[in-house]
Image (tube, rainbow, N blue to C red):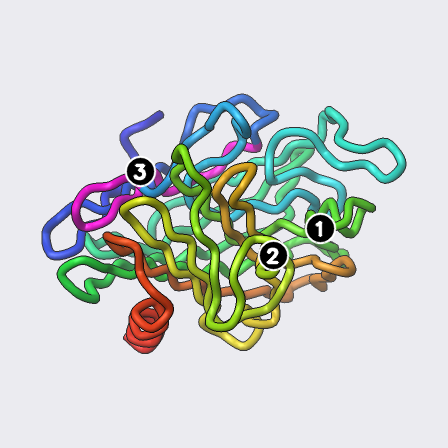
Amino acid sequence: MTDDSTVLRVAGRPVGRYVTRPELPARLSPRPYLHPVTTLAGTAVTELGPADHAHHLGVGVAVPDVEGHNFWGGRTFVRDRGPTELDNHGAQRHAGFRLRDPDGFVAELRWVAAGAELLRERRTVAATELTGTAWALDLTFSLTNVTGTTLTIGSPATNGRPGAAYGGFFWRARKEAEAPRVFTADAEGEARVHGGRADWLALAGSTWTLVFAGATDATRRDPWFVRATEYPGVGSSLAHHERLPVAPGDTLVRRVVTVVADGRLDRETAAALVRRAVSA
């Protein structure tokens, strides 16, 4: 790992490190990530390269299928074959910071595969204090097709694996002895929440809670990808039922705001903090 990383701070306290140029093997689809991310009390709420999924890298943007190229890491789901080791991994290359402050940054990235640049990304991240025990991580990514042809974004679900429409924003959370509680404003449990749309979704561990919210109309239309029992992770689904086309020169934009709180929040507190975070 190089020294070209940045530390996010809230009220003077470090709450996250953004690593720009990790030294990772190609099969993990190297990409910038945030890890560790912590609560204000210092509890880590991310994991990096865990044994169950070595390609899960804290908080970031990962897509398993961009016109057949894997920007997620690990095996590729192939229709009628299942998860398959392929030499099709891309990489997100940090191209520099346009802005870098203690409470946030704007970074430029190039998504490269098979020797060619496919997408150019602008990633904007901001950290905001909400209360003495909660802060918000605001992450926006804009992906522009820099090729001369339409690119389509897919997922294992669009390639034949039901229930696996992951791809986009993804947060690999802290794994504990017990699975975290998963809930929205009107649903409880992984089975009811996974694959559905909700204004916000909470993941509550033993001493911490993460509350995720889509902060634009387009982001709110993406179903949530949720895991709790197998491992704790939450992400968006850019390609849920069908592949998502991005025409030459077009830009896809998504914004997810995440409340990072100490303690196990109830529904009312989670909803109140999300409203404050999204409007901040």
The residue under the point 48% across, 42% down is 232
Residue located at (45% from left, 71% from top): 215
Task: Categorize mark 3 by other alpha carbons within 10 Å: few (<14), some (14-19), many (20+).
Answer: many
Q: Nearer the viewer, residue 138 or 39?
A: 39
Q: Quadrant of residue 52?
A: top right
Q: CA distance from mark 3 to mark 2?
A: 25 Å
Bounds of the magenta span? Answer: 29-44
Q: Is residue 184 left or right of residue 130?
A: right
Q: Secondary structure at mark 2?
A: loop
Q: Which residue is mark 1?
A: 163
Q: Tell me which amino acid carries mark 3.
A: Pro
Q: Tell me the element at label 1.
A: loop
- Provide the secondary structure element on which disc 3 rests: strand
The answer to whether residue 32 is above or below residue 204 is above
Q: Earlier along the polypeptide chain: callout 2 or callout 1? A: 1
Q: Residue tagged by mark 2?
A: 194
Q: Mark 2 and mark 3 in contact (Cβ < 8 Å)?
A: no
Disc 2 vs disc 1: Cβ atoms closer than 8 Å? yes
Question: Local crowd at mark 2 within 10 Å, few (<14), some, or many (≥20)?
Answer: many
- Quadrant of the snapshot with the N terminus: top left
- Tell me the amino acid under the disc marked 1: Gly
Please tell me the numbered disc located at residue 253: none
Residue type, numbered disc 2: His
Tag 3 residue:
36
CA distance for labels 2 and 1: 8 Å
Looking at the picture, does residue 231 appear above or below residue 127? Answer: above
Which residue is nearer to you in this view: 74 or 210? 210
Examine the structure image and report whether residue 32 is included in the region drawn in magenta: yes
